[in-house]
Amino acid sequence: MHTLCAVLLLAFVVLACSSPVVNKLWEEWKTKHGKVYDNQTEIDFRRAVWEKNVHLVLRHNQEASAGKHSFTLGLNHLADMTAEEINENLNGLKLEETVNFTNGTFKDVSDSPLPANVDWRKEGLVGPVRNQGLCGSCWAFSSLGALEGQLKKRTGTLVSLSPQNLVDCSTQDGNLGCRGGYITKAYSYVIRNGGVDSESFYPYEHKNGKCRYSVQGRAGYCSKFSVLPEGDEKMLQKVLASVGPISVAVNAMLESFHMYSGGLYNVPSCNPKLINHAVLLVGYGTDGGQDYWLVKNSWGTAWGEGGYIRLARNKNNLCGIASFPVYPTV
Ligand SMILES: *[C@@H]1O[C@H](CO)[C@@H](O)[C@H](O)[C@H]1NC(C)=O
Ligand SMILES: *[C@@H]1O[C@H](CO)[C@@H](O)[C@H](O)[C@H]1NC(C)=O
Ligand SMILES: *[C@@H]1O[C@H](CO)[C@@H](O)[C@H](O)[C@H]1NC(C)=O
């Protein structure tokens, strides 16, 4: 992370006068992220988008070192895409208009003091960070992430479940594969289908395919799911601490979210009503006096803090983190 900052700072100094340095940075970035473009028009367009993002990242990180932001941005693998393209291709979460809460469950959560920190990765309830690619399947990764945690709690084994199984097979439940889907309808499928295959049996392909579910590869199941009350961060904290990882919806529309590279994400303009992405809540804590949520994304490890983001907590439901939390029961 520090070398990248140094490189960027260097680039900033010379950006105006020396395009060879920018060219070098561009070549290095393309190599690092395995970028190959089809033709010159495409190269020119991607380069222009990338340069715009270079400026955005530099300006933000300068302000961050001056103490204006609690997080930094970086030129990750998404840096040659416009915000519109990212929101179109990677943020495929759809939201229910009306939802039936399963109430009563939360009252059972004990009122004993909550731990100051929770990180379900330490209990082995969270699998490795994955990459959904250019497919709006966040809803499948997020919902299965919570299910993997509950299955690990029940069986003692953490098994990666198959998002491709959900992408290919849950259209009947109202999901649209790579064009988007619902957390609740992901669980509806697993309940209706009587199971979901493992990732190893039914590997991810980041595109829509024909349903190939087989009971032979069945590695998970679900009996019901519960939706938490909207916008209640205290309740979310309680349930997270007692239940395990929770599937949540967030506003991931801002460029600062796309280019996030580390620190505590705290952007007051991140509107909790504009939800478009599903992620997995795996913990919470406090850093430098600011409470945060620990969130696992499905954009690969090159994004954020090894694929994770720390998002400001108890800031009026920032980015809608508590707007639509759902957890499955096995
Ligand atoms: C160049 O590549 C882009 C993206 O791959 C494609 O959409 C476009 O049609 C191509 N243009 C030409 C002139 O081949
Ligand atoms: C949700 O509640 C509505 C009204 O109370 C009811 O008509 C509907 O069948 C319920 N849906 C489910 C999935 O339980
Ligand atoms: C909540 O629980 C009460 C009592 O069990 C029940 O009457 C009510 O319909 C429930 N509401 C929802 C939204 O499920």
Image (spheres, rainbow, N blue to C red):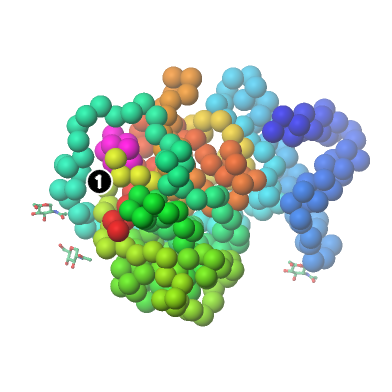
Give the camera-side residue of 273 and 197. Answer: 197
- Left or right? Give the position of 78 relative to 161: right
Q: Residue at x 54, y 66 (%)?
A: 200
Magenta span: chief secondary structure: helix
Give the position of the N terminus as an image quadrant.
top right
Q: Quadrant of residue 197?
A: bottom left
Is the CB of mark 1 within 8 Å of ligand 3? no
Specify the segment rendered in magenta.
232-241
Magenta-drawn stretch contains 69: no
| Secondary structure category for the residue under label 1 | loop
Q: Residue at x 66, y 50 (%)?
A: 78
Q: Residue at x 54, y 73 (%)?
A: 208
Q: Position of residue 35 (x, y in %)?
A: 76, 56
Q: Position of residue 156 (x, y in %)?
A: 39, 52
Q: Position of residue 80 (x, y in %)?
A: 71, 51
- Left or right? Give the position of 265 relative to 248: right
Residue identifier under label 1: 229
Give the camera-side residue of 59 and 249. Answer: 249
Q: In the image, is residue 189 above or below residue 211?
A: above
